[in-house]
């Protein structure tokens, strides 16, 4: 069993201004099926619309934002959850002071950085 606190996991740059990620659970720690990540997006920051061949399960921990698939927008807030199917376009924008969310993805080589394996 692994027990930790997200505050003790270093924040890493995502390549998007105002957006950080903390890799909480991943294969190198023993997770064979899923990876869990914690994102923090500062107000006004965005992750542009993109898509992958894997699903995402997301839980909004803090703040408010907009999740879009390019056709419709969903305003989300703390306590909301969502499922993004494989290959569905998706993008994020923080509208509150911050938007913080957990994102769970399958443990696939193409989805997780090499150093996490």
Image (cartoon, grey):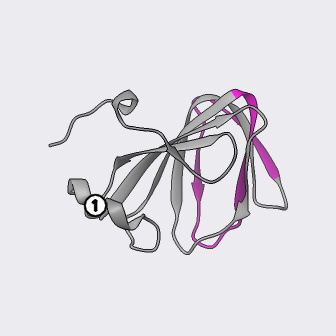
Q: Nearer the viewer, residue 67 or 117?
A: 117
Residue interval drawn in magenta? 73-97
Q: Which quarter shows the N terminus?
A: top left
Q: Residue 74: x and y, percent? A: 76, 45
Residue projecting furthest to the top: 97
Q: Which quarter shows the C terminus?
A: bottom left
Q: Is residue 31 visible?
A: no
- Residue at (28% x, 61% y) in the render: 27
- Judged from the image, the secondary structure of the residue bearing numbered disc 1 is helix
- Residue at (32% x, 29% y) in the render: 5
Q: Residue 24: x and y, percent? A: 36, 44
Q: Residue 37: x and y, percent? A: 45, 47
Q: Nearer the viewer, residue 57 or 110?
A: 110
Residue at the spot of label 1: 27
Q: Identify the image quadrant of residue 108.
A: bottom left
- Residue at (33% x, 60% y) in the render: 116
Q: Residue 60: x and y, percent? A: 57, 36
Q: Nearer the viewer, residue 77 or 21?
A: 21
Q: Identify the image quadrant of residue 39.
A: top right
Vertical position of residue 37 compared to residue 27: above or below:
above
Q: How many marks?
A: 1
Residue projecting furthest to the left: 1
Q: Is residue 29 visible?
A: yes
- The majority secondary structure of the magenta stretch comes to strand
Dot 1: few (<14), some (14–19), or many (≥20) neighbours within 10 Å? some
In the figure, is residue 32 to the left or right of 56? left
Q: Is residue 83 magenta?
A: yes
Q: Is residue 19 magenta?
A: no
In the figure, is residue 7 to the left or right of 101? left
């Amino acid at each position: 069993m692994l027990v930790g606190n997200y505050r003790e996991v270093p924040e890493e740059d995502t390549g998007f201004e105002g957006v950080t990620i903390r890799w909480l659970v991943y294969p190198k720690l023993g997770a064979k099926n899923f990876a869990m990540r914690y994102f923090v997006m500062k107000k006004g920051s965005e992750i542009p619309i993109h898509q992958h061949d894997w699903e995402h399960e997301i839980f909004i921990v803090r703040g408010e934002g907009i999740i879009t698939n390019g056709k419709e927008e969903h305003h989300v807030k703390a306590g909301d959850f969502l499922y993004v199917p494989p290959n569905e376009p998706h993008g994020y924008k923080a509208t509150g002071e911050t938007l913080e969310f957990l994102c769970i993805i399958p443990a696939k080589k193409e989805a997780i950085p090499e150093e996490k394996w």
